[in-house]
Every structure is written in structure tokens, then in C-alpha cells.
Amino acid sequence: MSTKKRMIEDQLKGRDITDEDVLDAMQQVDRELFVPEDKKDRAYDDSPLPIGKSQTISQPYIVAYMAQELNLEESDTVLEIGTGCGYNAAVLSRLVKKVYSIEIIEWLSKMAKENIEKTDYDNIEMKHDDGYEGWSENGPFDAIQLTAAPAEIPETLKKQLKIGGKILAPVGTTSQKLVRIERVSEDEYKEETLLMVRFVPMTGQAENK
């Protein structure tokens, strides 16, 4: 059994997580609030964990890595596509002014809301919907993070970024890569691949593209 302290020291600091704000956010959020009762003794394991119906909570390292690679500021507004159990949104909420999060699976969206209610975090707004179209009425966003993999990043999401804003997303079907896209002008984007990953596929409209 791993503890939160061991997670911070071994899984995060022991690798390449050096951003103190990210480390502090990971320290603040209790991962055991977001896992099923029978998995609480494994809440800080160095791995994803099943949360029901083939869904998982991400490995702590991946949550921290993605947050670090977005280089977030306290004043930022972030859109998350794929709330899951709410853990990633909770971590992001400790780093930024506001998190908007969309989950396409109804029971998972309900679970996330129940999990977030166990915390005192009041800067997360969630809804049950298809995230392919984003959440334009609350944009443009400083950052957009996807926690499910489309075959390619939807143009609708790219257009909801501020100039200078970044999207971080797993992209691909059989083979996935974690991609960071920065909007450098109205019609220009800079893309880089960070590492190979494995996420659940993005569903809904993304399946038909």
C-alpha cells in the first residue's frame, strides 16, 4: 500500500515532476475520495485504478505530468473534456481560477459531482454532455485538457483557445501520443508530441469523425 507522502516523493519528485505548484496541488487533493470503497487502500498506487464499467482513474503521475506540461497560472480558466470521477478536475482546481468540465457518460458525471461535493472546492463547474463541441459560452480558455483520446483534436476545441493558450490531449486510435498544441495566432497553431500514452477513446461525435 502506498501513501500520499510516498506518492509525492517517489512517483512524482522521483521522476520529473518539479513544479512546486503541481506538487502542492497533488498534496492537497485526497485521491481516496475519488476511488471506490474497495480500492481506497490502493488510492495512491502508482497506476490507474478501475472505478467501474471499464472506466479508470488516471495514474497520479500522469495527472501531475499533464498539469505540469500546461504550465498553468492562478488566473487561468481551464476546460476539461472527460471529467471521469472528478480527480483530475480537483487537481486542476487547486492551480487555476476556474475549471469547466464535461463528461459524456451520465453515471460518471453524477459520480464526479458526488465526489467533488466531498471536498470544499467551489471553482469547478461540471455538466453531462458530449465534449466534442466544447463549452463555448464560457470560453475562450487559457487551457483545454482532454482525458480521452480522439483520432484528431476537434477544430471546435482549438477555436475555443485564447491566443497563447494550450490544448493537451492524447491523440490516436491503436497507438496514442500525448500532444500539446499552442494557439499562436488566430489561425496558426504549434504542435509537439510529448510522450506515448494509453487513454480510453473519446466517444460521441468523435467516433464519427
Image (tube, rainbow, N blue to C red):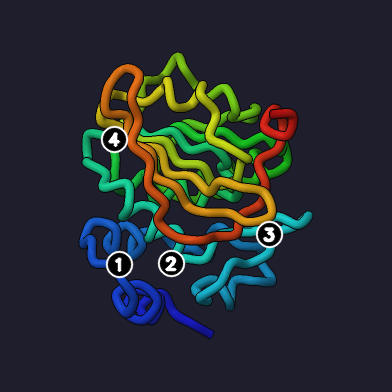
In this view, the residue in front, 209 or 8, is 209
Label 4: element kind: loop
Mark 1 neighbour class, 10 Å CA radius: few under 14, some 14 to 19, many 20 or more: many
Amino acid under label 4? Lys
Q: Give the residue type that dot 1 points to.
A: Ile
The label nearer to you, 3 versus 1, is 1
Residue indicated by mark 1: 17
Q: Residue furthest top?
A: 137
Q: Looking at the image, is mark 2 or mark 3 nearer the viewer?
A: 2
Do residues under tags 4 and 3 come within 8 Å of each other at their CB atoms?
no
Q: CA distance from mark 1 to mark 4?
A: 22 Å
Q: Where does label 4 land, which residue? A: 97
Q: Quadrant of the C terminus?
A: top right
Q: Residue at x 45, y 41 (%)?
A: 145
Q: Is residue 123 visible?
A: no
Q: Amino acid at mark 2?
A: Tyr
Task: Residue 51: give its label.
Answer: 3
In the figure, 122 relative to 188: above or below?
below
Residue occupying the point 64% across, 27% down: 129
